Structures are given as C-alpha cells and as structure tokens.
Amino acid sequence: QVQLVESGGGLVQPGGSLRLSCVGSGFTFSMRAMTWYRHAPGRGRELVATISATNGNANYSASVKGRFTVSRDNDKNTVWLQMNNLKPDDTAVYYCSRGWWSASDPRGQGTQVTVSA
C-alpha cells in the first residue's frame, strides 16, 4: 500500500532553516509528481511546493517562494523541502502527497515545524 513518511521537523528560531524529508513506498515514485502542504491551527491547509516526476519543474505558493526549495531523488524515493528564512507563520504540520499541486493522499503522521524565538 502507499506509504508516505515525513521527517525533519523541529523547533527553530525565526530566520533559521530546516530540511524536511518524505520517503514514499508502495507506488512507482519516479512516475509521480509530489507536493508538500501544511496544516496550521486556525489557518487550514495550504499547498506550499510541488515538483514534477522527472524534469525538476517546481511550483511554490506565494508565501514561501524564494525561501523554500523542493527537490527529489528518485533513486531514494525521497522528496525534500529545504526551508530557509523561516517565519513564525511557517509553523505547521507538514505533509507530502502524490500529485502535482495536490493533497489527495490521506494524511500521514506529518512532521511538526515550530518557528519561535
């Protein structure tokens, strides 16, 4: 069955960086675009970054563009989200999903990112 396992979150000060990882299994990872999205209390779901299956095309939400970078390694079935210059508004649980600009997969456990001084 499809499994997506997120990791890499933590507590970081404003202006800091984190790199999140999502490892996929149970499907042909190299054939699927992947999306990162987040849930924050009171703000609902926000799609933040997406990357195509093979050619590296990516798209970002306006709120993270220029600060976050999505990448992947199909040999490792892994997609990453490099987050720089983090802000308190980035505090959320982050999830990954299959598909271009999509959050269609059931949520996994996610990884908590907390940006606070």
Image: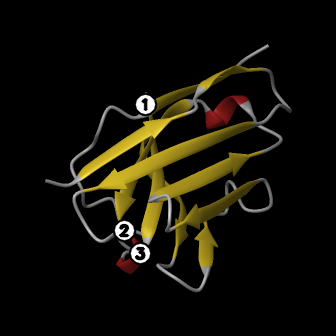
Q: How is the image coloured?
A: secondary structure
Mark 1, secondary structure of its residue: loop
| Crowdedness near tag 2: few (<14), some (14–19) or many (≥20) residues, C-alpha within 10 Å | many
Q: Dot 3 corresponds to which residue? A: 30
Q: Is there CB contact under 8 Å for labels 2 and 1?
A: no
Q: Position of residue 23 (x, y in %)?
A: 42, 49
Mark 3 lies on a secondary structure that is helix
Q: Position of residue 69 (x, y in %)?
A: 70, 59
Asked if labels 2 and 3 touch by Cβ distance under 8 angstroms, the answer is yes
Per the image, the residue denoted by label 1 is 42
Disc 3/disc 2 C-alpha distance (Å): 4 Å
Viewer-nearest of discs 2 and 1: 2
Q: Position of residue 58 (x, y in %)?
A: 61, 75
User: Amino acid type of disc 2?
Assistant: Phe
How many other residues sit within 10 Å of disc 1, few (<14), some (14-19) or many (≥20)?
Answer: few
The amino acid type of the residue labelled 1 equals Gly
Examine the rendered structure and indicate whether residue 112 appears above or below residue 65. Answer: above
Q: Which residue is mark 2?
A: 29
Residue 54, numbered circle:
none
> Which of the two labelled residues, at mark 3 and mark 1, occupies the earlier sequence position?
3
User: Exactly how many numbered labels are in the figure?
Assistant: 3
- Which quadrant holds the C terminus? top right
Q: Nearer the viewer, residue 6 or 41?
A: 6
State the image quarter where residue 29 is shown.
Answer: bottom left
